[in-house]
Amino acid sequence: PGCWMLFYATPIPHQMDWVRRIEDRAAELDGPEAEALDVNNGHMSSRVEVEPAEEALAERCLADFQQFEAGITTARLARYWAAFRNNVEVYLMRKVGTTVDQRLFDLYVHLAVNGSFYRFTELVMRMSPLEADAGVRMMQYLGQGYAKAIATVLNVSVLWH
């Protein structure tokens, strides 16, 4: 044939690989390795770049998160937002160029928040019910705002009710 392609089996990262890469970073690395969540030796399907938008969002909302975890860093928060963006993109990719119902969109936000803010979510859920509710509402509110921006980039409209 005039063309050939190499297919190889790439192991699917375990959920704990993602958690370790986001939570257990050695002293907030500098350089290109600090700018990506790479759980599979650079294979593109499992490498998530921490983009300037996540860094800016982390700086803007750091004080909101510090109300619940005083020691959270901007770098860890940016990694959470990068994981969140990746999850929202995966959910919305099938909807490019279409309109989704708000209830479905809110479900995507809920799933992405629950699949991105690992240790922070665990800490919030151990708080009193009133504090936990406030923490969850904060993550959902900020997450919905960021998900709206992601949806716009992906040309996905939301039918708001």
Image (spheres, rainbow, N blue to C red):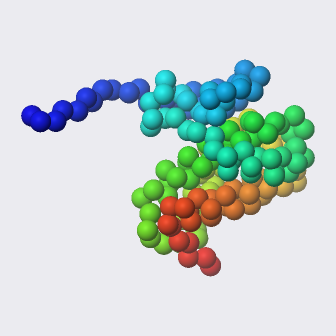
In the foreground, 107 or 1:
1
Number of on-image labels: 0
Which quarter of the rendered picture does the C terminus lie within? Answer: bottom right
Q: Is residue 24 above or below residue 152?
A: above
Indicate the position of residue 95 as horizontal and vertical percent values: 44, 63
Q: Furthest-top residue in view?
A: 26
- Horizontal arrangement in the rendering, residue 84 relative to residue 100 (left or right): right
In the foreground, 119 or 3:
3
Q: Furthest-left residue in view?
A: 1
Q: Residue at x 74, y 49 (%)?
A: 56
Residue 14 shows in the view: yes
Q: Is residue 140 above or below residue 9?
A: below
Task: Tell me the quarter of the picture where residue 151 sits.
Answer: bottom right
Q: Residue at x 67, y 27 (%)?
A: 31
Q: Residue at x 63, y 40 (%)?
A: 50
- Horizontal arrangement in the rendering, residue 88 relative to residue 30 (left or right): left
Which quarter of the rendered picture does the N terminus lie within? Answer: top left
Residue 107 shows in the view: no
Q: Is residue 87 above or below residue 99?
A: above
Indicate the position of residue 14 as horizontal and vertical percent values: 51, 29
Task: Tell me the quarter of the picture where residue 83 sits.
Answer: top right
Indicate the position of residue 130 as horizontal and vertical percent values: 88, 54
In the foreground, 73 or 19:
73
Indicate the position of residue 52 as horizontal and vertical percent values: 67, 46
Q: Is residue 75 above or below residue 90?
A: above
Q: Residue at x 33, y 26 (%)?
A: 9
